[in-house]
């Protein structure tokens, strides 16, 4: 083998060695770039992804505009009826203003179903069923609501009557004081103001 062929072989080996070095360097750069992108994606997902329980934390309340409903979904409330006041009662009238009774409310999707019984203003046993809705106004402890449905016991016999009762609530934790306006119904020809306590039983079961 002459010197010319040896020199050509050396050139080929050197070129192949340099090519391999360049290829390895390129592959290393590509791997570094892929790792960097993966890290950025992972970091981005970590920072901006929504937690799995985000939707769960938002469930249980009904929102509308600036007012937040204080009625939580799937919660049970117990109402204890207390008393009533007839501001325009005549001297001839003798309405019963001690009205003990008990009722249940089941809250669902911003509304609630209610039912219960009490001793009414003419000393008769009354029952009621209805659908209600209430909202906070300005603060979580103050709310406005209305309950509409059927009430019995204000005429002779069963005699169901339609009624709508607006009310306000003052809340402190699980307990609320309800003050409601009761329009004249049946044999009670005077409007009244009623009072009841309501207790959130959702966390006690």
Image (tube, rainbow, N blue to C red):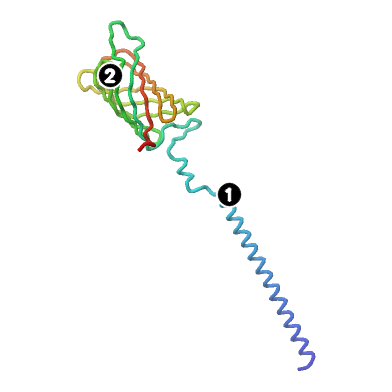
Q: Quadrant of the N terminus?
A: bottom right
Q: Residue at x 30, y 29 (%)?
A: 115
Q: Quadrant of residue 61 in the image?
A: top left
Label 1 crowd bin: few (<14), some (14–19), many (20+), radius 10 Å:
few
Q: Residue at x 44, y 27 (%)?
A: 172
The label shown at residue 86 is none
Q: CA distance from mark 2 to mark 1?
A: 60 Å
> Residue 135: x percent and y percent?
44, 28
Q: Residue furthest right?
A: 3
**Helix, strand, or loop for circle 1?**
helix
Q: Earlier in the sequence, mark 2 or mark 1?
A: 1
Q: Is residue 184 left or right of residue 56?
A: left
Q: Quadrant of the C terminus?
A: top left
Q: Residue furthest front?
A: 204
> Residue 26: x percent and y percent?
68, 69
Whether the residues at callouts 2 and 1 have beta carbons within 8 Å, the answer is no
Q: Taking 71 as reference, is 33 above or below it? A: below
Q: Which residue is mark 2?
A: 120
Q: Residue furthest left?
A: 157
Q: Which residue is mark 1?
A: 47
Q: Residue at x 28, y 10 (%)?
A: 94
Q: Quadrant of residue 186 in the image?
A: top left
């Amino acid at each position: 083998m002459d010197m010319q062929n040896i020199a050509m072989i050396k050139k080929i080996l050197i070129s192949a060695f340099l090519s391999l070095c360049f290829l390895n360097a390129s592959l290393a750069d590509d791997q570094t770039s892929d790792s960097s992108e993966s890290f950025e994606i992972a970091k981005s997902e970590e920072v901006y992804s929504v937690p799995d329980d985000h939707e769960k934390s938002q469930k249980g309340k009904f929102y509308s505009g600036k007012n937040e409903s204080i009625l939580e979904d799937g919660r049970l409330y117990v109402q204890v009826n207390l008393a009533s006041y007839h501001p325009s009662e005549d001297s001839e009238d003798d309405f019963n203003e001690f009205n003990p009774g008990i009722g249940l409310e089941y809250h669902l999707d911003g509304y609630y179903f209610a039912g219960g019984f009490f001793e009414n203003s003419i000393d008769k046993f009354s029952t009621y069923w209805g659908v209600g809705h209430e909202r906070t106004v300005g603060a979580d402890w103050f709310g406005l609501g209305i309950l509409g449905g059927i009430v019995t016991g204000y005429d002779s016999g069963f005699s169901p009557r339609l009624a709508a009762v607006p009310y306000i609530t003052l809340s402190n934790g699980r307990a609320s004081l309800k003050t409601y306006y009761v329009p004249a119904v049946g044999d009670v020809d005077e409007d009244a103001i009623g009072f009841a306590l309501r207790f959130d039983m959702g966390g006690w079961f």
